[in-house]
Amino acid sequence: MPEQRKKQMNSAIKLTVLFLALYALVTQQVLANTWIRRVDEWIYERDFLLITPGKTPTLVMLVDDLGLRGVTAIILLFTAVLISRRFKSWRPINLSILSLLLLNLTVGVSKLLFGRTKPSTGFDLVFTDSGLSYPSGHAANAILTWGIFAYLIFRYSHKYPFEGMRLTWFVAIVTTGVCLASLYRNTHWFSDLLGGLFIGSALLVAIIAVDRSITSDRQPS
């Protein structure tokens, strides 16, 4: 492995560990019923939050849909297929499928394990039989899926170095919008979103690091 890629891999490992540590910290604070759940309660009681789902503005729903796995998975796989056909490589498709599988497995198991109720129930309980609030799948999905989407475009299609920063801003804006929409609709606690962002970020960095560690003549950069 070239020296530059070794440095990139080391940085990615450190960043992944950091995000996992932050996810573990948020999880511990939620389960221990500490200050972070007081923040959740404070946000829940704000007047600007929408309690009736039927009155959600169309724009908010559209933004919220950008975090739906069904929607983003189709967009990601469609993009991966186009790039794969262009460069005659299965790598973009394999990377996309890997990210979707890891996302659903990690977040799904966590939701079932912690069993946290949603704000719409009016109760904040953990380890219930029906709770699926923590971590937020919307937040994790937004940053991971749109992050892989941007990564594929950057690695296979970019022409100028600044396009990478533009795509980073795109992912950040979409992810922030999805999180704000979830708060507005009262479908997730604030700490749910934090947990989702951290676990999604950890998966994103780890998956990209693995892809970058494997050289390919068909990958432009």
Image: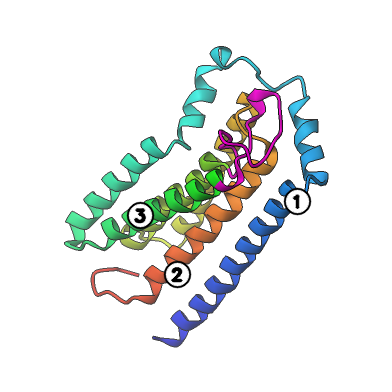
Residue pointed to by mark 3: 153
Q: Nearer the viewer, residue 186 or 154?
A: 186
Marks 2,3: beta carbons within 8 A: no
Q: Position of residue 102 (x, y in %)?
A: 42, 55
| In front: label 2 or label 3 | 2
Residue 126 percent coordinates (x, y): 67, 40
**Residue type of the residue flagged with mark 1:** Gln
In the image, 103 versus 84, the foreground residue is: 103
| C-alpha separation, residue under disc 2 versus residue under disc 3 | 16 Å
Q: Secondary structure at mark 1?
A: helix
Q: Marks 2 and 1, Cα distance to the nearest angstrom? A: 29 Å
Residue 189 is drawn in which quadrant? top right
> Which segment did they paint magenta?
113-135
Q: Residue at x 46, y 35 (%)?
A: 66
Q: Quadrant of residue 211?
A: bottom left
The residue lying at 39 percent from left, 71 percent from top is 212
Which numbered dot is residue 113?
none
| Rendering coords of residue 154 (x, y %) | 38, 58
- Say which quadrant the N terminus sits in: bottom left
| Residue type for callout 3 | Ile
Residue marked by disc 2: 209
For label 2, count other residues whose C-alpha is less than 10 Å away and answer few (under 14), some (14-19) or many (20+): some
Q: Label 1: which residue?
A: 29
For discs 2 and 1, the disc positioned in front in the rendered view: 1
Vertical placement of residue 78 versus 3, above or below: above
Q: Position of residue 99 (x, y in %)?
A: 39, 55
